[in-house]
Each structure stands twice: as C-alpha cells, then as structure tokens.
Amino acid sequence: MADGDLFSGGGTPWGRRKGSFPFLPGGHENYLAVLRTALKTMTTPVAKESLISWGGPDSLIPASEAMKYLAPAGLVLRNSDDTVEVADEARRWLETDDSSILVEIFHRNLRFVGELLSEIDVEGLTCAEIAEVARRHYQLDWATLDQINRRTYWLRATGVVELLFTGKVVLTDRGREVLARLTTAGRDQFELVDGQPDSEMLEQLSPVVTALLEDAARRGLAGRVGAGMSYVPKGGQYSTVESLAAQVDAATPAIERSDFMDFCSREFTAKPSSSSSALDTVRNTGLVAQIGRDTFAATEAARAWRASNAVLDLVGVVHASIRCVGELLPMLEETRTVGELAEMARVRFGGLVLKTPVLRNRLQLLREAGLVMQPSFSSYRATARGCVFARTLPLESEISAEVEEVQESRGGTLDFVVQDLIDAAVDTAHFENFERALTAAFQSIGLDAEHLGGSGRTDILITVRRSPTELVRIIVDAKATKNQAIHEGAVDFSTLVEHRGQHQADHAALVAIGFDSGRVRSRAAATGIALITVDELIGVIERCRVEPLAPVELVNMFVPAMKEKLWSDADRRAEIMAAVIVAVEDESEYVAETGGNFSTRDIHRALRRSVEPSPDMTEVQDALNLLASPLVQGIRPDGKNGYLPGFPAESVAARLRFLGAAVNGVTAKE
C-alpha cells in the first residue's frame, strides 16, 4: 500500500487531515459570502499583520488570525516570507463559484467530510446520531456536538445536505454528485485488529532498515536515545514527514553545518538555535550522521527511506534510534491522552521522562504514517495498521517487577534517579553512566534533556522553550571523579566553549562531585561556564518534588550570576500570593459585615505590614488579576477599582491544580 493511499480521499492520508472545522461569524447562511470576502483580500500575498474583513466592514482581524482558522482547511497558506495567501484550490473556488470545489477542499484537508456524506446517504441522521457514528466507527470521540454542527452548517451552506423538520440531515442530489467523486475511508479501516498480523496491510521494509532494527535489538533497545525528537521545523506547509525528508535530501550526499543552518533558515524560517535543534533531531533519529568536524551526511538507512518513499521505513529508522516510538502503539490500543502516555512510559521503562513536545512529535510521525489517529485534540489511538505494525517491530521490554521493587525500596523513581547520580559520579571506569544519570536527573525536574556524548559532541543538550517560537539551549559536560573535586587539568574549557558555539547554545555548565577552589573556578568565571556540584543538583531535585519550578525558571541554574537566586523570584511570588489570599479573606469578612467592596490599595496596605520587603502596587495587582480571572474566580471585579469576595482559598487551589493538569496534557499547536 503506498503512503498516499492510506485512508486517502483526494490524495491526503486520514492521519494528516485536521479534526477541527473552521468557524466563521454571521451564521451558516452567510458562510460563503464571509469566506469569499476574506479570501479576496488575500489573492495576492499580504503581511500577517494586515487587517482583513471578517464578517463585515466593521469587523476586521489580522491575516495571521484568519490563517489560524482557514489554513487547516486548506484555504490559505503561509509563505516562506511570512506572508499569507489564498491556496490554489481555494483560488479555483473564487474563480468558479462552484461550491462542490469547496466540499472537495474540506474533504481533502479535514476528517469526516465525505465520510459524513456517505453515512447519511440512505435515510439521513440527526446530529446526535452522526456524532455517535463518528465515535463508534471513525474513532472521533468529540465531547460535544460542536464539530458535527460545524460540518453540517458548512455542508448546508454548500448545498450538499439539508436539514429536515424532523431534525435529520439528509443528502441532496447535488450532494450525491459530489460524494461520487470522493474517495472515503470505510468503517472497516478503523477497527482494531486481533490475532496475528496481516502482512498484506503493510508494505515491506527496506532490507537496510530491517537490518538496522535487528542491530538495535541486539544492542539493547533501552540504550537508544531518550528524548531525541524535541524539535522538527514545520515552516510553511511542511508536515513532520515532509520536513524530515527535506532535511535528509539537503544532507545528501553531505552538507556543512553552516549550510544546514542556512537551509533551515531559508526553508523553515528557523532561528539559528532552532536550526541547531533540528540538526540534533535528525542526528538522534538516525537520519543524519556527523562525518567530519562540521560536516554531516544522510545515513544509509535515511537514503533507503528516500529511495523507497515508504513512510514505514522512516518510522523504522526512528524507532531503531530513539526510545518509545513503536512502543507507543501497544499503549494506544485504547484511546489515551499525552499525559497518560507520558506516565505509562515512565512506569514501563524505568523512569523514562518524555515531555509533552517530545511525545507529540513522536505521535505526529505515527499519525502521518497512518499508524495512529487523533480522536480529539489531546487524545490518540492506534489504527488497525498501527496495531499490525507494532507486532512486526522489536519492542523494548517493560521494566521488571524486580526492578520496580528496587525502586520502591529506594523511595520511588526520583530517589532511584538520585542514587544513580551519586553512584555514577564516582564511576570513572564508565564515565558514560554519569552522562546518562545526569540526563535522567535533568529530565526528572522537567527539563528536555538529551544524552549525546561521543567524540566531538557535548555530553548533554538541554532545550527549553522560552515561548512557543523561542528556544534556550544549554550544553552540559559531565566529569566523573573519585576525588573530592575536579582539578584544572581535568577540564578543557576551550572545548566547552567550542561545543557551546557548535550547538548555538545560550549557556554551558560543568557537573561534578566538586570543583577545585582555585583555577577551575576562575577559568569557569572567565568563560561563562556554570559549575554545578552533584549535591547542588540533588538539592534542586528534592525541592522540585514539592515546589517545582517551570523549565524557563530552571534555566537560571546554568547562569553563574543567577544560580544562587534560583528560587528567589518563585519564592517571592508565592509569598505575595499567599499573603494576598489571606488579606482578601480578611477583607471579605469586613465587607460581609459592613457592605461595599475592597480595593487594590486596601490589600497593599495590609501586605505592607506582613511581607518583608514590602511589595509594590504592581506585585499586588498582578496577584489580584490572577484571582479575578474568570477561570479562577477567587475574587469578583466590582466597578473600576473594587473587588468582591469570590471562591474561598481551597477552591482557588483546586481550580489552579485542575488548570495545571489541563495545561500539562496539551502542547502548542501542531
């Protein structure tokens, strides 16, 4: 089966179609007019800041915001120069005014369009019945009818369905004509497969990839790279597979580091730090290898994939190189969220920590390969093809009960991490054990850490997202020693500085049992290298258990001037928030007795007596703004500068925990 044929309708695999239909203002009867007006303003490329009509001359939004609604449906695209423009297919609709073209565009780019038409072809269905069909037979487990309603509104607007007085949505004659031109996914393609694998469902892997998988199994699958897929650039309209293909092609036969950076900047509009992360990803996934000081080349397995153009070859190469790729498929025989998968990976594979962006990149690859589907934004499930493919792969064994007992006796996974760190820091005969233990330690506190190691490479690379588009990169060198401290002769600071430049890193650190108080510390200060002792790192791990810091805050651990103040900002915020809540409850009692409301000035006055040093008005207002959010409702705005009591402190805490869990399970948009 060719990659493009999998669940294809008009040439696009089901796994690469989006789930959410665009929303337009003004009611479905005005959808086509609103869409036409919006698209006409983008027939020539416009800057993303340009304002376009969105439902009327008095309703304008930036082109970048319109793109968020319309790009997933294949109606507009972002060019490499960051401008927004109408897609070719949508341009054809504008020129012909043939609404059937619009239906075909939707079917090609969005799930459950032609399939919905085929399901209502005979007698029609209500929206609730359509939702049940989507859930039972297409693994689209939407929590509300919103996505079904959006589909039926658009299909009614294009004239291919109509709504009867009975509440049933039925196909029109025009709808039957359009349906006849669409290739739809049948129910049977979404059923999970029991029993033995059906080899006819899968294309044969290339011999090179098969040999690579066999070699990985011989070497031990637990030895693969842990995180390894933290960033895949997708500028413009690139999918994960297309992005990796473009990078492999650029590295065939070979490419210099600077040329690769230029390629990523030109092709994906990637920043230098992001381009370095992209290079790390294709290296860790076994697609590109370093063949010289600053020269890289596509691997034999990567070239075999590009020759076959079979996406399963790509999955096989990645699975052989990094942990928890094919292993996700058995976990997804039931629908699970990213958070659930992360916890399962941690429990099954010896404390393996996979952050949400790292897991989502794996899942996106599996989805584009037709091995996984996405019933909702935050949940995934294996397809029949995925279940069969998993049975053909060598999979990492789950952690044994014996090892679990050892972990439990050491006080849990984190204690296991700490003990490994202590043991490995003095194991000079196996220095790579210290590198792996450090990687696990950083992962345990929420950092996206990758173990690189080897000649010419830094030991550990940490990537932190300062924003959805800005990355901070940190290189870490591990020095195992049986002595109480590392002396000057054991550290090559010039190499550390060189590695920092090679990886476009913002910070660099050296970790060891201890450091000589003389030249080592002065050389580190002169080169901007942070020195971190094992005891200091253990202290951070233990405190993060009860007072976790955000990854962007943990960056300060690698900044020499900020290391001693790691918790100071967080402690200050926590102290002021706690004091504000106490003051709010005191003021609430006063308001209940006397009426009226309380102000920011009232709370500030109370905190001047209880917090040292006294907070300024901005600190107090920031805390009150959080409490006044409709998502928290700890207080209620009353007039311009006043507040009324809201939920009590225990309810505020519960709401914040719930929101934290929700954010922890969802990442930036794909």
Image (tube, rainbow, N blue to C red):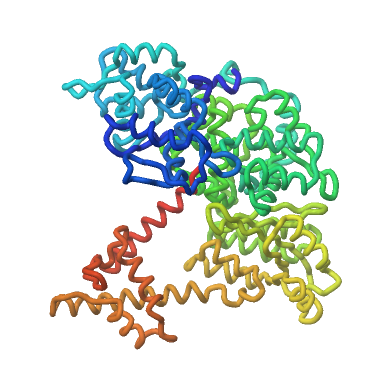
Q: Position of residue 467 (x, y in %)?
A: 53, 56
Query: In the figure, 340 relative to 482: above or below?
Result: above
What residue is drawn where x is 33% and y is 45%?
59
Q: Nearer the viewer, residue 128 or 488?
A: 128
Q: From what the image shows, is residue 472 above or below residue 187?
A: below
Residue drawn at 24 percent across, 73 percent down: 642
Q: Position of residue 657 (x, y in %)?
A: 38, 59
Q: Quadrant of residue 69?
A: top left
- Residue 304's quadrant in the figure? top right
In the rendered image, residue 532, in percent from the top left (x then y), is placed at 68, 71
Q: Considering the image in quadrants, where does the N terminus appear?
A: top right
- Which quadrant of the view contains residue 482? bottom right
Q: Is residue 539 visible?
A: yes
* Residue drawn at the location 67% of the way across and 61% of the way down: 474
Residue 290 shown left or right of residue 444 in the figure:
right
Q: Nearer the viewer, residue 611 or 149?
A: 149
What residue is rendered at 72% in x and 46% in y?
262
